[in-house]
Image (cartoon, rainbow, N blue to C red):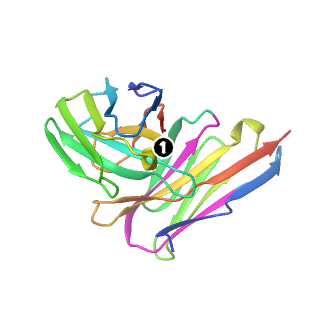
Amino acid sequence: DAGITQSPRHKVTETGTPVTLRCHQTENHRYMYWYRQDPGHGLRLIHYSYGVKDTDKGEVSDGYSVSRSKTEDFLLTLESATSSQTSVYFCAISDMFNNEQFFGPGTRLTVL
Amino acid sequence: KNEVEQSPQNLTAQEGEFITINCSYSVGISALHWLQQHPGGGIVSLFMLSSGKKKHGRLIATINIQEKHSSLHITASHPRDSAVYICAARETSGSRLTFGEGTQLTVNP
């Protein structure tokens, strides 16, 4: 299995609080992605990174920011969490853009 | 209408049956991915293909680029194949990967 971990795995927070999710990889892959998965929708891309300090928006980026200060770590931040951001968040990595992707175990976030 | 449509949404089969899951897409693509999401939530990449057919064990994926259609077949299905199967289309530009909503497969013993 590709070495990808996510932390925390579960989090419950209140509306208006900041939340940071971490994705860590040991594969030295260039590309890292954050997705959210919701009932009735396929996986949707929030942000992605194509290198250290190089990031770009996906289709559902509003309300989210990301940072990548090291190859192995990609952080997703919700500056002020809202109930609509209750979801399961997956991190993924790939060696080439939108090539075969390896997924982390997911983080279940509940915003009350 | 979603750009990537999967059918059926839900599928129940008996152990040993041959299973087919379909994926159709409306955009021009350079590759199509098939993923498996286990009941515990983990997602695993099964195939990435841009033409023809690929086989891995009891799983076979086919694609017809001109007809904008791909199928995932499972031969001699087993209860451990129970999962959600997801297809994702990579647009020709390579800039976007669009996911289907998934097909929930249940294989009963």
Q: Position of residue A4 (x, y in %)?
A: 39, 27
- Indicate whether residue B27 is drawn in magenta: yes
Q: How many marks?
A: 1
Q: Position of residue B34 (x, y in %)?
A: 52, 51
* Residue at position x 43%, y 40% in the image: A89
Q: Is A38 left or right of B7, judged from the image as shown? A: left
Q: Which residue is mark 1?
A: A87
Q: From which residue to which does the magenta span run?
A: B20-39
Q: Residues within 10 Å of mark 1 (few under 14, many from 20)?
A: some
- Indicate whether residue B101 is drawn in magenta: no
Tell me if residue B45 comes above or below residue B68 in the rendering: above
* Residue at position x 81%, y 51% in the image: B13
Of A112 and A76, the residue lying toward us: A112
Tell me if residue A41 comes above or below residue A68 in the rendering: below
Q: Is A61 left or right of A112, judged from the image as shown? A: left
* Residue at position x 31%, y 41% in the image: A80
Q: Position of residue A109 (x, y in %)?
A: 47, 36
